[in-house]
Image (cartoon, rainbow, N blue to C red):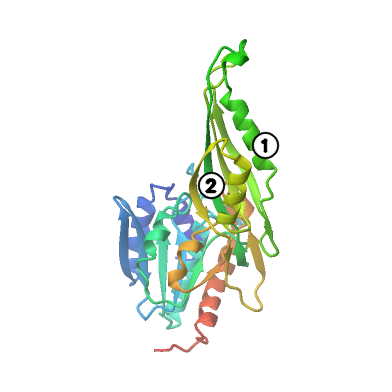
Amino acid sequence: MNVVEWAERLIALPSVTGEEGALEAFLDNSLRRSGYRVERQEFEPGRANLFASAGGPIDIVFCSHMDTVPPFIGAERQGEFLYGRGACDAKGSIAAMLAAGQTLRAEGFDRFGFLFVAGEETDSRGAKAAAALNPGSRFIMIGEPTGNRLAAGHQGVLNFHLAVRGRSAHSAFPHLGDSAVHRLLDVLESIRSVDLGEDPILGKSSLNIGLIEGGSAANVMAASGQASLLVRCAIRAELLLDRLKTAIAGRAFLEVLSETDPQKLGTRPGYETTVLPFGSDAPYLGVFGERFLLGPGAPEEAHSDHERVGIRELEEAAALYRKLARELTAEPVGETRR
């Protein structure tokens, strides 16, 4: 299959996080039929990563994630674009990697492998488990939508939950109660005033208060309140967490759900670069060697109801993956080191 056919087949298979099985089975079967040596790494019942070798000692690993955010949206081609869930995040990257692999093998180059992981959109459980594979590679190329530019880095993530307890009472007698919602709002206002930090390359950190819950009725003072927040970190998550705890000053219970530090990634002379405001599996994949991150599609299209990837971008990505594999491993076209 060419890169567009690969992409259409991949997008057509639902693979919302936790339900990657159908896509994993398709890739497993396709790679085995193409002559790759495939290892299925089950990291919890019914969920697995795929690791495939082209045959030679592995210098570079092509890696992307199989899962998508919900809901599933089927594949549709309109003009020069493919639409559907995962079109750019990140099934377009998988398709381009598979197409690049076809070309590399046809040229006699087999010092590469594929790593397709589950769970990137939530807790990166697949990538964390994959660290145990350790094939001795020197480089890993991670696929995420970057507009086919090498990502010089991306921000980290601090995802946390706040909970506040109060005392319920009739709202006509506020002196008898203690509104947890009012107290929570005060805490959130303090958090919004925190200096979240910035980095000369990664830019400023940003805060999103994604969910607020509390209370039972408009005429009842709230006995409890809670909120879920996420910071895109341009500085170390630990440093940022200390600043947040100072602002909270014991007025709420804070539970960290996940945290990763900002990442600086590999670049190459002659390649356009970008910096990404979102995270990836990169923090957990250092065991595979120097990390690079590039893929087709605009980052802004990811997770949207109009997610898409350009046909030309897919073709360009396949060519870039093949070119970078050759350059990084110092293998000129037409020569193969044994």
User: What is the x, y in percent for residue 279?
Assistant: 55, 56
Q: Secondary structure at mark 1?
A: helix
Q: Residue at x 41, y 80 (%)?
A: 111
Amino acid under disc 2: Asn
User: Is 270 rendered above or below residue 152?
Assistant: below
Q: Name which quarter of the figure residue 106 lies in.
A: bottom left
Q: Secondary structure at mark 2?
A: strand
Among numbered discs 1 and 2, the one appearing first in the sequence: 2
User: Is 116 rendered above or below residue 176?
Assistant: below
Disc 2 residue crowd, few under 14, some 14–19, many 20+, Cα 10 Å: some
Q: Residue at x 60, y 40 (%)?
A: 248
Q: Which residue is more in the foreground, 115 or 30?
A: 115
Q: Which residue is more in the foreground, 286 or 86?
A: 286
Q: Which residue is mark 1?
A: 189
Q: Name which quarter of the figure residue 136 lies in.
A: bottom left
Q: Which residue is mark 2?
A: 159
Is residue 221 in view?
A: yes
Q: Residue at x 54, y 26 (%)?
A: 214
User: Is 290 rendered above or below residue 262?
Assistant: below
Amino acid under disc 1: Glu
User: What is the x, y in percent for residue 19?
Assistant: 38, 47
- Quadrant in which the N terminus is drawn: bottom left
User: What is the x, y in percent for residue 31?
Assistant: 36, 66
Disc 1 residue crowd, few under 14, some 14–19, many 20+, Cα 10 Å: few
- Residue 106 is left or right of residue 158, and the answer is left
Q: What is the C-alpha distance between the residues marked 1 and 2?
A: 18 Å
- Quadrant in which the C terminus is drawn: bottom left
Q: Residue at x 63, y 37 (%)?
A: 188
Is residue 74 in view?
A: no
Q: Which residue lies most toward the top here? A: 172
